[in-house]
Amino acid sequence: MARIPYADTDNEATRPLAQRIVAERGSILHLYQMLLHSPPVAQGWLGYLTAIRQQSTLSGAIREMVIIRVAQINRAPYEADQHIPIARKEGVSAEKLDALEHWADSPLFNATERAVLAYTDAMTRNVQVDDAVFASVAQVFESQQLVELTATVAAYNMVSRFLEALQIHSTDHR
């Protein structure tokens, strides 16, 4: 159960943004219902994550593997639960998702995916990224995609830290 109650999405302060979230996302997930305690933060968050998820030039499969990998490392099950179905829609096989936690030992991942996952692991676990790890992703991506990849890893580290600090889970009742 979340550490604080979820925000009321039907009051004057939250209603307009709650309606926008429903229009853009189809529903208000627990994450956004918690963020709506601060409409300015929720609005900024929505803009940032929309840019990451819907306006980036990274492939959807790469993006979703990054998000799920961040969730695995940070022990953030809600984040992974939300993105596994999206990853499947983006063409990531169930077998690959099952192997993601031990990607370094799995033959299922190609060179690009390995470079991306090594970068994701380094950013998430160490913050600083070794030159060799960065060089691997820089061989694959141009500057725009390097920025988008880095922003995706950073954004979903933010998401998992928010979720876990407030103990937001898929099984919560609003």
Image (cartoon, rainbow, N blue to C red):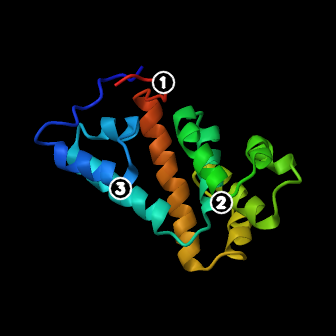
- Report x, y in % for residue 1: 42, 19
Which amino acid does the dot numbered 1 rest on?
A: Thr
Q: Nearer the viewer, residue 14 or 122?
A: 14
Residue furthest top in the image: 1
Note whether residue 123 is visible.
no
Q: Could you tell me which residue is drawn at 18 percent across and 49 percent down?
A: 16
Residue furthest bottom in the image: 142
Q: Could you tell me which residue is drawn at 43 percent across and 30 percent down?
A: 165
| Label pair 2/3, CB-CB below 8 angstroms | no
Residue that numbered label 1 is attached to: 171
Q: Secondary structure at mark 1?
A: loop
Closer mark to the observer between disc 2 and disc 3:
3
**Which image quadrant: the C terminus?**
top left
Question: Mark 2 or mark 3, which has the lower sequence index?
Answer: 3
Please state if 166 lies on the left or on the right of 82 as rendered. left
Closer mark to the observer between disc 1 and disc 3:
3
How crowded pointer 1 is (Cα within 10 Å; few <14, some 14-19, many 20+) is rated as few
How crowded pointer 2 is (Cα within 10 Å; few <14, some 14-19, many 20+) is rated as some
- Report x, y in % for residue 160: 50, 40
Give how far apart the Cα atoms at labels 1 and 3 are: 23 Å
Label at residue 24? 3
Note whether residue 44 is visible.
yes
Which amino acid does the dot numbered 2 rest on?
A: Ala
Question: Mark 1 or mark 3, which has the lower sequence index?
Answer: 3
Label at residue 61? 2
Label at residue 32? none
- Report x, y in % for residue 54: 47, 64
User: 148 above or below 29?
Assistant: below
Which image quadrant for residue 34? top left
Give how far apart the Cα atoms at labels 2 and 3 are: 21 Å
Question: Mark 2 or mark 1, which has the lower sequence index?
Answer: 2
